[in-house]
C-alpha cells in the first residue's frame, strides 16, 4: 500500500462565497407580494382617472426585480484558497466566470489582517514581494477573522515542511 505524497498533502482548502440571506424561492414570494402591493396601491388611482400612477408603480416593480437580479448575479462570484507544503493558490472567479489566479510559496507569503477596535477584522490580504491580494472582501468581520485564523495556522504548518511519518 503506497502512502500519499507528503508534498501534495492539502493543509488548507476553502471556497469563499458572498452571503445571501434570500433564496430564489423566497425572492419569488417577495416579488409576488411586492407586485401585488403595487397593483392594489395603484388600482384606486386608475379608477379615479390618474392612470399614469399605475405605470410608475409598474416601473417600481421592474426596478425592484432588476436590483435583485443584479444581486443574485453578483452572488455567483467566489474565491478558492488552497494550501499544500509547496504552494499557496488563490483563485478569484467573477460573476461572469472570469478567473484570476495567484500562486506563492508558503515560505515567502505573509498574511495581513487589518483590524478595527470597534468593527473587527476589516481586511485580509496575502503579500509576497510586490504583490498583494485581498481575500474575502465580501465577508463580514467575524467570518474574515475565522478564515484568517485558519489560514494563519495552516501557513505556520506549511512552513514546518511536510511530515514523512
Image (cartoon, grey):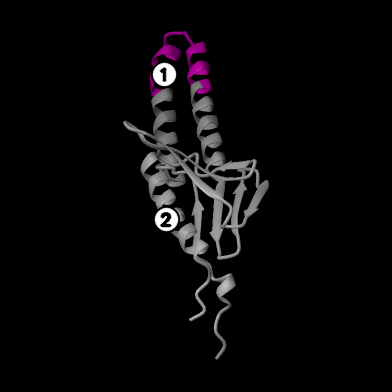
Q: Nearer the viewer, residue 134 or 110?
A: 110
Residue occupying the point 56% across, 65% down: 85
Query: Marks 2 and 1: CB-CB under 8 Å?
Result: no
Is residue 147 located in the magenta-colored stretch of the structure?
Answer: no
Residue underneath mark 1: 43
| 106 and 57: which is toward the camera | 106
The magenta segment: 40-59
Q: Quadrant of residue 119?
A: top left
- Judge the density around disc 2: few (<14), some (14-19), many (≥20) Cα neighbours within 10 Å: some
Element type at mark 1: helix
Residue corresponding to mark 2: 150
Residue in the foreground of this view, choosing between 63 and 9? 9
In the figure, 137 relative to 59: above or below?
Answer: below
Secondary structure at numbered mark 2: helix
Q: Which of the pair 10/165 is nearer the observer?
A: 165
Q: Is residue 78 left or right of residue 38?
A: right
Q: Quadrant of residue 44?
A: top left
Amino acid at each position: 500500500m503506497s502512502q500519499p505524497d507528503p508534498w501534495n498533502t492539502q493543509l488548507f482548502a476553502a471556497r469563499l462565497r458572498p452571503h445571501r440571506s434570500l433564496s430564489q424561492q423566497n425572492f419569488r414570494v417577495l416579488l409576488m407580494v411586492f407586485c401585488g402591493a403595487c397593483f392594489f396601491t395603484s388600482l384606486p388611482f386608475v379608477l379615479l382617472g390618474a392612470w399614469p400612477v399605475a405605470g410608475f408603480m409598474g416601473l417600481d416593480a421592474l426596478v425592484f426585480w432588476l436590483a435583485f437580479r443584479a444581486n443574485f448575479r453578483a452572488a455567483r462570484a467566489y474565491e478558492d484558497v488552497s494550501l499544500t507544503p509547496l504552494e499557496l493558490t488563490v483563485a478569484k472567479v467573477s460573476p461572469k466566470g472570469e478567473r484570476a489566479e495567484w500562486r506563492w510559496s508558503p515560505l515567502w507569503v505573509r498574511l495581513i489582517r487589518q483590524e478595527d477596535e470597534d468593527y473587527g477584522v476589516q481586511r485580509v490580504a496575502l503579500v509576497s514581494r510586490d504583490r498583494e491580494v485581498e481575500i474575502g472582501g465580501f465577508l463580514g468581520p467575524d467570518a474574515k477573522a475565522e478564515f484568517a485564523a485558519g489560514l494563519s495556522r495552516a501557513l505556520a504548518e506549511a512552513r514546518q515542511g511536510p511530515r514523512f511519518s
